[in-house]
């Protein structure tokens, strides 16, 4: 695409975590968009960045107004400018006459970030009028917002209707996310082992079904393990169990059996007296969690067994922590998996980490550079791996 001198709208996902001083605490998503932004700068485009940030309309001030301080995208500008290697301009609105004036003043190679798209209700509604107004800001539309590609919102999806096929494209982050997910799901080097964690089975049903077809083995940890263990008749104490998903858990186990595949459950757990960082805890068999205790991490044997399962893997997909890793006492299962994934990656395993919490875990142990690919998508990666077509992708490919 010839972008020289053109106004190029780039939809990015700068929905990043901030501390209480509004400083970016994890710049992974911003970093991911830098190749696209620098490419466009290098080609002499006028770069107009659009992004959402959190959910301002669901978190209004007590007086019913938008919290334009807390939810402003201006907080990411210092980090963004540093990563781009030049000053990125910011404008405190997203559409309208003043935005046009500002954009018309851009020189070739300039970059401007506009205000949070979710300050307008039309964004999440995918409103046609709002989408048209966004589209009118530029001549070319680039979608590099993989993290928001599962949303059929104005700036992620509907906007693309107002550009013909020669004037819209994926950015490099989107391209690499899609290629890596495809690599794992369509051409995995075998054996393909999936590690799934997180609190609830209900969030992962479609993923497990999709993986029963594609993976050779599924390793389960985190809160969701206890729904399976209870379904098998185990004593789970006051562990998190989704009572209404017990039949489903048994069906998934039966389906795996029929396919000759294994769903591995943790043979032991770290059980705690309460859900607290300072709780008393002990290592117990996962099927024998005492009354009044709750499983908050995989146990010592499970750590050892899971690490062994990963040896010799051709492909590993990891989504979701093995325990309550934000509490030190219950973080060791997740850390052990992080180390094991990094180790086997060194010997040639292709490893993809997706989902906010497992990504945070691998970063916490300083191993982010030791895995093959870290996805910037939580929900988006999940839906892609489930085999769904993402609205942000379909918008470009038609
Ligand atoms: C995310 O963080 O998951 C994406 O930025 C999408 O945000 P949302 O879940 O608020 O739509
Ligand atoms: Mg989210």
Image: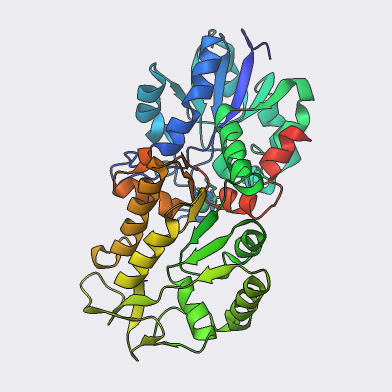
Q: Position of residue 253 (x, y in %)?
A: 60, 76
User: Residue, x 41% and y 49% (percent of image)?
Assistant: 359
User: Residue, x 56% and y 9% (percent of image)?
Assistant: 43
In this view, the residue in front, 180 or 15, is 180
Q: Position of residue 27 (x, y in %)?
A: 38, 37
User: Residue, x 48% and y 30% (percent of image)?
Assistant: 92
| Quadrant in the picture for residue 280 | bottom left
Left or right: where 133 falls relative to 101: right
Left or right: where 32 falls relative to 386: left
Quadrant of the rendering where the N terminus is positioned: top right
Q: Position of residue 50 (x, y in %)?
A: 56, 31
| Quadrant in the picture for residue 259 | bottom right
Q: Is residue 299 visible?
A: no
Left or right: where 314 falls relative to 397: left
Q: Report the label total.
A: 0
In this view, the residue in front, 229 or 146, is 229
Q: How is the image coloured?
A: rainbow
In this view, the residue in front, 223 or 379, is 223
Q: Please say if 170 is above or below 310.
A: above
Quadrant of the rendering where the C terminus is positioned: top right
Q: Position of residue 194 (x, y in %)?
A: 52, 57
Left or right: where 165 falls relative to 322: right
Q: Is residue 211 visible?
A: yes
Q: Residue furthest bottom?
A: 291
User: Residue, x 35% and y 60% (percent of image)?
Assistant: 334
Q: Please say if 249 is above or below 40.
A: below
């Amino acid at each position: 695409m010839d972008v020289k001198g053109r106004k190029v709208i780039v939809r990015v996902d700068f929905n990043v975590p901030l501390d209480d001083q509004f400083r970016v605490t994890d710049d992974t998503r911003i970093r991911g968009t830098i190749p696209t932004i620098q490419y466009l700068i290098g080609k002499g485009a006028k770069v107009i960045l659009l992004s959402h940030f959190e959910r301002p309309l669901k978190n209004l001030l007590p007086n019913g107004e938008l919290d334009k301080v807390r939810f402003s995208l201006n907080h990411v500008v210092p980090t963004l400018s540093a990563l781009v290697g030049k000053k990125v301009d910011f404008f405190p609105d997203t559409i309208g006459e003043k935005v046009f004036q500002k954009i018309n003043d851009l020189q070739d190679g300039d970059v401007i970030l506009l205000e949070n798209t979710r300050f307008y209700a039309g964004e999440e509604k995918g409103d046609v009028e709002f989408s048209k107004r966004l589209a009118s800001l530029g001549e070319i539309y680039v979608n590099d917002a993989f993290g928001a590609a599962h949303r059929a919102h104005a700036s992620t999806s509907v906007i693309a209707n107002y550009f013909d096929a020669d004037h819209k494209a994926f950015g490099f982050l989107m391209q690499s996310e899609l290629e890596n997910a495809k690599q794992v799901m369509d051409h995995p080097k075998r054996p393909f082992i999936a590690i799934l964690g997180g609190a609830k089975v209900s969030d992962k049903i479609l993923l497990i079904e999709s993986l029963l077809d594609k993976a050779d083995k599924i390793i389960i940890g985190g809160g969701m393990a206890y729904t399976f263990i209870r379904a098998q008749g185990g004593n789970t104490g006051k562990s998190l169990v989704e009572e209404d998903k017990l039949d489903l858990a048994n069906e998934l186990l039966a389906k795996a059996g029929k396919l000759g595949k294994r769903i591995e459950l943790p043979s032991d757990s770290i059980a705690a007296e309460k859900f607290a960082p300072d709780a008393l805890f002990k290592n117990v068999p996962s099927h024998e969690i005492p009354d009044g205790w709750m499983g908050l991490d995989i146990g010592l044997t499970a750590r050892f067994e899971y690490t062994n399962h990963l040896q010799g893997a051709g492909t590993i997909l990891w989504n979701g922590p093995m325990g309550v890793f934000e509490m030190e006492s219950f973080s060791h299962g997740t850390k052990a998996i992080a180390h094991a994934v990094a180790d086997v990656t060194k010997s040639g395993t292709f490893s993809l980490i997706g989902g906010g919490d497992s990504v945070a875990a691998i970063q916490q142990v300083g191993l982010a550079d030791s895995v093959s690919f870290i996805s910037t998508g939580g929900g988006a990666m999940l839906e892609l791996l489930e085999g769904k077509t993402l609205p942000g992708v379909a918008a470009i490919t038609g």
